[in-house]
Structure formats: structure tokens, C-alpha cells
Image: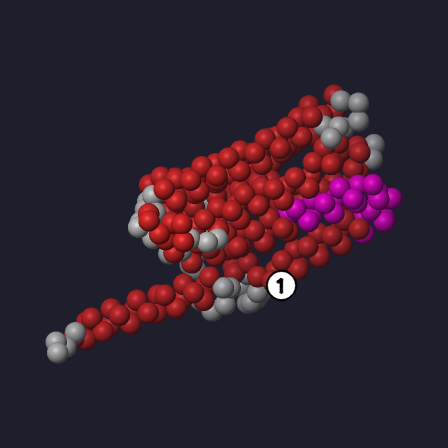
């Protein structure tokens, strides 16, 4: 029998360690990915000095702080109508955080090419797209919408918006817009990945789940639709965004399955 030698043993050990770390990162325990290999949101969770916060606790804190702020300010200023809109927005933002974590874990679990991981995580383009969405929202709220009969800000905060309530409104809106930007980028990155690379049946199964999570990420935002029925521009923007995300991810799934290695076994794949 040929001795594989110490170098091969070390390589095998390194591969085993890499797989173990990947599996731990995928289920939220153990080793976390390095910065530059995560969404900006994930990096923030792990970047607080001296504080070790689990993902679940971070989500609870996010929802609790925002929702308590909404309810307290609604009670202080008598803005209970606005509290309904605020609660819906907080739910959408928190659900978006959950989906971001689920998508990133699935992507890393599939162990795709490094180029794709850099493309989706390392570029931080989701932040740029979130900023663009937020600026578009502000432009609508403070330039176009005031020309309508009842501006959305007035509906939520009253004719004389309180300072603290306005601050919280803009903060929650940014949270929602950031997740909209993330949905855009995850969809585009998924289509690029499906076109450029070929995957094994197991990788395809996991990446397909990630694409479906991204679509679900968009559908969650339809919870905002009842709040926008009297604001056609925002209504069309939100629904159009969801349709675009669903379309791009559907195309990504079609290409992903068609390019799967061992195409004869695709019929055995299950999501």
C-alpha cells in the first residue's frame, strides 16, 4: 500500500476542517464567515466589540426596539393610525432580516465558487441599491407626494409630524429599503451565477432553495400594499419590484436546473 505521506494527510485534514466550518456557519453555530463574505447586516451583528449576540437574539432585539418605539411614540403623540403602518413596516424589515440570514446560509452551504460569494457578499452593492431606493422614497415623500390630497407622511404622522416620530419613521424606512436593495442584488447575483457556473445536483438543490427564499423575500413586501392603495406611485413601485424579483429568480432557477451536472438525475432533485 502506498503511504499518502504527511502532506496529503494535512491537506485531507484541512479539507475536513473546511467542511466542518462551513457546516457550522451554515446552521448558525460555531465558526462564522469572515467579514467580506457576509451581508453588511450579518457583519454588523458580529462586529459589536465585547458583545456576542446570537442571530435569533439579534432579530428579537431588532423587532422589540423598533416596535416598542412605534408604540411608545404612538401613545405619546396620539398617532395610533400611524402605529399600524409602523408595525407592518417593522414586521417587513424583521422578516427581511430572517430571509437575509437564511439566504446567506444556503449560499455558503452549497459551497459555490469563490467568485460568486465575492459577487453576492463582498461587493456590498446591496447597500448601494438600498441607498438608491431610500433616496427615491424620500424624493417621493417630500417632493411628489405633498402635491397629492393627503400625503403619506401626513396620514402616518399627522399634519405636524413630531420630531422623534419622524426620525423613527425614516429609520424604519431605511431598514425596509436596505432589504429591498438586498432582494434586487440577490436576484441579479443568482441569475449571473446560474448562467456562469455549472453545479452538482446537491449544489443545485441548495441553491434552488436560496433562490426560492429570495422570491419569498420579495413576496413578504406585499404586506405593505394595503398601506399604499391611495398612493399609486409607491404601489406600482412595490408590486413592480416583487414581480421583477420573482421573474429574475424564476429565470435563474430554469437556467440552474438546465445546467446541472448529470442532467439525467435532475428529476430526482427535491427542494
User: Between 117 and 263, which is closer to the camera in this rendering?
Assistant: 263
**Residue situated furthest left in the rendering:** 2
The picture quadrant where one finds residue 172 is: top right
Asked if residue 212 is among those painted magenta in the image, a careful observer would answer: no
**Residue situated furthest top in the rendering:** 147
Residue at (45, 48) in percent of width and height: 208
Residue 257 spot, x, y in % from top left: 39, 44
In this rendering, the answer to whether 43 lies above or below 82 is below
Q: Which residues are magenta?
A: 72-93
The picture quadrant where one finds residue 1 is: bottom left
Chief secondary structure of the magenta portion: helix
- 68 lies left or right of 14: right
- 239 lies left or right of 211: right
Residue 221 spot, x, y in % from top left: 63, 41
Q: Which residue is mark 1?
A: 57
Name the element at disc 1. Answer: helix
In this rendering, the answer to whether 191 lies above or below 43 is above
Q: Is residue 264 visible?
A: yes
Residue at (74, 21) in percent of width and height: 147
- 158 lies left or right of 202: right
Residue 196 spot, x, y in % from top left: 33, 41
Tell me if mark 1 has few (under 14), some (14-19) or many (20+) residues whose alpha carbon lies within 10 angstroms of its own. Answer: few
Residue at (42, 58) in percent of width and height: 109
- 196 lies left or right of 127: left
Q: Is residue 37 visible?
A: no
Amino acid at each position: 500500500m502506498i503511504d499518502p505521506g504527511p502532506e496529503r494527510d494535512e491537506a485531507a485534514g484541512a479539507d475536513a476542517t473546511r467542511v466542518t466550518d462551513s457546516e457550522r456557519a451554515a446552521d448558525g453555530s460555531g465558526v462564522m464567515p469572515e467579514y467580506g463574505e457576509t451581508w453588511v447586516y450579518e457583519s454588523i451583528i458580529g462586529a459589536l466589540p465585547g458583545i456576542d449576540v446570537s442571530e435569533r437574539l439579534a432579530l428579537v432585539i431588532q423587532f422589540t426596539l423598533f416596535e416598542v418605539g412605534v408604540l411608545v411614540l404612538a401613545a405619546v403623540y396620539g398617532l395610533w393610525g400611524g402605529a399600524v403602518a409602523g408595525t407592518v413596516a417593522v414586521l417587513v424589515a424583521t422578516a427581511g432580516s430572517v430571509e437575509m440570514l437564511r439566504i446567506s446560509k444556503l449560499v455558503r452551504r452549497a459551497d459555490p465558487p469563490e467568485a460568486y460569494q465575492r459577487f453576492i457578499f463582498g461587493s456590498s452593492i446591496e447597500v448601494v441599491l438600498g441607498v438608491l431606493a431610500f433616496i427615491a422614497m424620500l424624493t417621493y415623500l417630500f417632493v411628489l407626494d405633498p402635491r397629492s390630497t393627503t400625503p403619506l407622511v401626513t396620514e402616518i404622522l399627522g399634519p405636524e409630524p413630531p420630531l422623534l416620530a419622524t426620525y423613527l419613521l425614516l429609520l424604519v424606512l431605511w431598514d425596509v429599503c436596505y432589504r429591498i436593495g438586498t432582494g434586487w442584488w440577490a436576484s441579479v447575483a443568482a441569475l449571473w451565477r446560474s448562467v456562469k457556473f455549472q453545479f452538482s445536483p446537491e449544489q443545485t438543490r441548495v441553491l434552488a432553495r436560496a433562490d426560492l427564499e429570495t422570491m419569498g423575500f420579495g413576496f413578504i413586501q406585499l404586506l405593505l400594499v394595503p398601506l399604499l392603495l391611495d398612493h399609486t406611485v409607491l404601489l406600482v413601485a412595490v408590486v413592480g419590484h416583487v414581480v421583477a424579483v420573482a421573474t429574475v429568480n424564476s429565470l435563474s432557477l430554469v437556467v440552474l436546473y438546465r445546467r446541472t451536472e448529470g442532467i439525467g438525475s435532475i428529476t430526482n432533485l427535491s427542494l
